[in-house]
């Protein structure tokens, strides 16, 4: 897997009001939408989960998850802890996996290396990450925690955890 791309066993099912970063593609990395449209959809109950972070809305629409499922593909949701808690109140039964940085210092280095975030955004992300890493230790919050200190190793752990789901999807497609 190229180090800068997500595994394509999944189709992106998230919407956001933030602007695309360099190299991101609408409909592949996120569905980039206008804030007023997303707010209307949230009010209409069209999202499985949603949250506001750094002044931008993020969410997973119900139709996007359904579209992925109808393609017999694995739907991987990249959500914050608030999203995890929201999904736990629904009837879906996903595998909850937390992928975390080795430390807050390494996360800060990675964020600064991107050169896409303001200082204020970096500080907000670090504050949220600190809280999320602590809360992820709660019993029953996640089925598994992967520490992303080596990208290839973390990817292999994730792939191994999803092996049964991947096999199910592949057998149905045949």
Image (tube, rainbow, N blue to C red):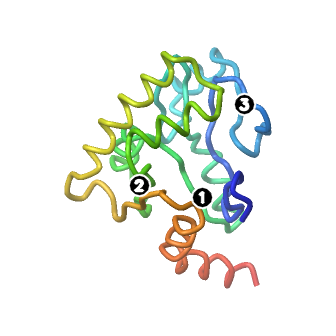
Say which label, 2 or 3, has the lower sequence index: 3
Mark 2 lies on a secondary structure that is strand
**Quadrant the C terminus occupies:** bottom right
| Residue 131 against residue 148 in the figure, above or below | above
Q: In front: 89, or 117?
A: 117
Q: Name the residue that disc number 1 marks.
A: 75
Instruction: Identify the disc placed on residue 162.
Output: none
Q: Residue sitting at 37 percent across and 60 percent down?
A: 145
Say which label, 3 or 1, has the lower sequence index: 3
Q: Name the residue that disc number 3 marks.
A: 21
Q: Name the residue that disc number 2 marks.
A: 98
Q: Tell me the distance, in whole angstroms, between the alpha carbons under discs 3 and 1.
A: 22 Å
155 displayed left or right of 72: left
Q: Residue sitting at 47 percent across and 40 percent down?
A: 107
Tell me residue 138's x, y (percent).
Answer: 21, 51
Q: Are the two marked residues, 2 and 3, in contact with CB atoms closer than 8 angstroms?
A: no
Say which label, 1 or 2, has the lower sequence index: 1
């Amino acid at each position: 897997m190229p180090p800068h791309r997500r595994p394509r066993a999944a189709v992106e099912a998230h919407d956001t009001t933030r602007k695309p970063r360099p190299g991101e593609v609408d409909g592949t990395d996120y569905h980039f939408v206008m804030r007023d449209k997303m707010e209307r959809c949230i009010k209409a109950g069209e999202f499985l989960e949603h949250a506001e972070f750094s002044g931008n809305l993020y969410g997973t629409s119900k139709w996007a998850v359904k579209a992925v499922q109808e393609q017999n593909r694995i739907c991987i949701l990249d959500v914050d802890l608030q999203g995890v808690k929201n999904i736990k109140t629904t009837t879906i039964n996903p595998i909850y996996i937390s992928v975390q940085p080795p430390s807050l210092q390494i996360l800060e280095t990675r964020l600064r290396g991107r050169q896409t975030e303001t200082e204020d955004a970096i500080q907000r992300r670090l504050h949220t990450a600190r809280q999320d890493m602590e809360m992820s230790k709660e019993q029953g919050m996640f089925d598994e925690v992967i520490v992303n200190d080596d990208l290839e190793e973390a990817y292999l752990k994730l792939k191994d955890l999803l092996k049964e789901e991947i096999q199910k999807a592949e057998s149905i497609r045949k």
